[in-house]
Image (cartoon, rainbow, N blue to C red):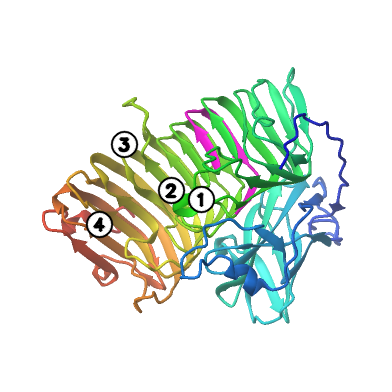
Amino acid sequence: MKGMKAILALCACSALLFSACGGTGGGNTGDNGGENPPGKEEITCEVYPVAYEEVNAVQDMDAFFAQTRAGNGSSHDGKLEYGFVDSVWHTLKVNERDVSVYSARCGTNVHSFAWVDVETNAQDGELNLNVKLDLLTKDKSEVTVLPEKLKESAAYSDGAVSATLNYYGSHSFVFDKQPDKALTLYVAPRSELKIPAGWEEVKISAGEHTREDLTFTQQNTVYRFGSGAYDVYSMSFPSNSIAYFDSGAYFRVHEEMPGDYWAAFRIDNAENVKVQGRAVFDFSDCQGGESKTKGVYSIGSSKNVTVEGLITVNSNGWTMCADASQNVEISRCMFFSYRTFSDGIMLSDCMDSGAHDNFVRTGDDAIEVKAFSQNTDPDFYTKNIVYENNCVWTDKGIGYGCIYESIKPVDGVYFRNNSVGFAQAAWSDHLGCATVQMGSVKGTTWQNIHFEDMEVYSSSCALISIFNRANNEAEGGIIKNVYCKNITLKYATKTQRDVYALSVIIRLLNGAVGSNCRTSGIYLDEIMFAGTAITPENYTEYTYKEIAEGATFSNSAIKVNSLS
């Protein structure tokens, strides 16, 4: 494939799609004959559906999904031609505007997605968008909109869904309490490009581009990618820059050569970088699994970085990764993947950072903290991390947590107001929706980890899992002060071992060196497990403990409803 050696200017225009919030009725009304109250401005919206060119069409969705399998039940981690297709199951309108729907492979079935941007004069919570969704197969009997805590109203009859949406963020339409044929609609405020005074704008056209073409070095510059289909290997952005993707930008990511390790975009040793707009990245043509070399998105040793508005399909490895960085924020992204090691959002040894308002469905762990940086500064480690208002589905791994690689300390991680749609992984007892899994270095401490205000719709694994392991003399660690408050699981489904998902699993064992594992301070407050409130009187019925000989743990370390 021949890369373009020159940056081409882009001239593109897009039509504004206008409608009133709530349909043709002209907005919210009061009690004065359908008119707005005196002094109250009429609420209006401009709706901008996101659509892509050169998307493949596939009618046999069973065959499309079957490509996720290698033939022996494991993931197909090799290269595929494409990662998402036009949906054959759904048609969608938002405020009477046609919205394109696409379908991507995930670990247990196909997940459909759509995106609309909204420009409105209303305050948050007043959008009142009318959604008309047709399920063309008409083989379901009811609909639920997740997360349920938003209380979005929806009605279903003979394949037709009518719903009213009031909030920005992800809205997942699920049928008959199952993930089959689910659709997630993302509603976002319109992202506008604002060029700082004195900065230059460089426009990049759709087409083929080598890594050298897209290795940018000029600061105080906006790099603007126009709509259309791109074939790329990697791009990188310097300090004091903005990467802006116009609506409809579609990137097919390729490996430049065997052993290509360059991530699709890289931000290294930089500061004050923004990645924003609307783009989809497809990694189907990159090798995954144990043989992978190429990265997905990489932020390293950087400061003041924001990433917003990306859709990713078929990640071939860890998806959104930040390492040894400060003030990193990931927001309003959607990730769909099934491959081995395709974790969603991972921050390692980051400070004052986090992620919010993302939808993640992964082939491994979804949203996590690790601590394996080679940064030798003893004062630079994972602390003050906030993950908030995210929605995840897990087919193979863990929902939210601090996960395993523990070379350095962790102190102060907050998972707030997040949700889990379907947690379907059940192949190991260490899996959970809210998880602390430690063990790679015995001398480190992970502490002050908070899981608060969390909704889980359906789970086949533990609601809460505390797991400390030592396979050899070097492994193990110290877990201190894990706070779990107001966590609700609606449906506990049977696992592969034909037992129901437990509320809490505590394991200080996965090997022979229990004395290296220490755990204390597990706080369980306002935990609701499939309709049963967990109390000091009944919590042992919903708790499984396996403690290795020599491990440091006392039953008094579990404190139920002590903080309420």
Mark 4 or mark 3: whose residue is earlier in sequence: 3
Amino acid carrying label 1: it is Gly
Q: Are marks 1 and 3 in contact (CB under 8 Å)?
A: no
**Circle on res. 368:** 2
Q: What kind of element bears circle 2?
A: strand
Q: Are marks 2 and 1 in contact (CB under 8 Å)?
A: yes
In the picture, residue 6 is in which quadrant?
top right
Image coordinates for residue 25, horizontal then vertical, percent: 85, 61
Q: What kind of element bears circle 4?
A: strand
Is the N terminus in the top left, top right, bottom left or bottom right quadrant? top right
How far apart are labels 2 and 3 at the CA level? 15 Å
Residue marked by disc 3 = 408
- Mark 2 crowd level (few <14, some 14–19, many ≥20, 10 Å Cα): many
Residue at x-position 78% and y-position 31%: 203
Mark nearer the viewer, 4 or 1? 1
Query: Does any portion of residue 392 appear in the rendered image?
Result: yes
Q: What kind of element bears circle 3?
A: loop
Mark 4 or mark 1: whose residue is earlier in sequence: 1
Image coordinates for residue 107, horizontal then vertical, percent: 52, 64
In the picture, residue 274 is in which quadrant?
top right
Segment colored magenta: 297-313
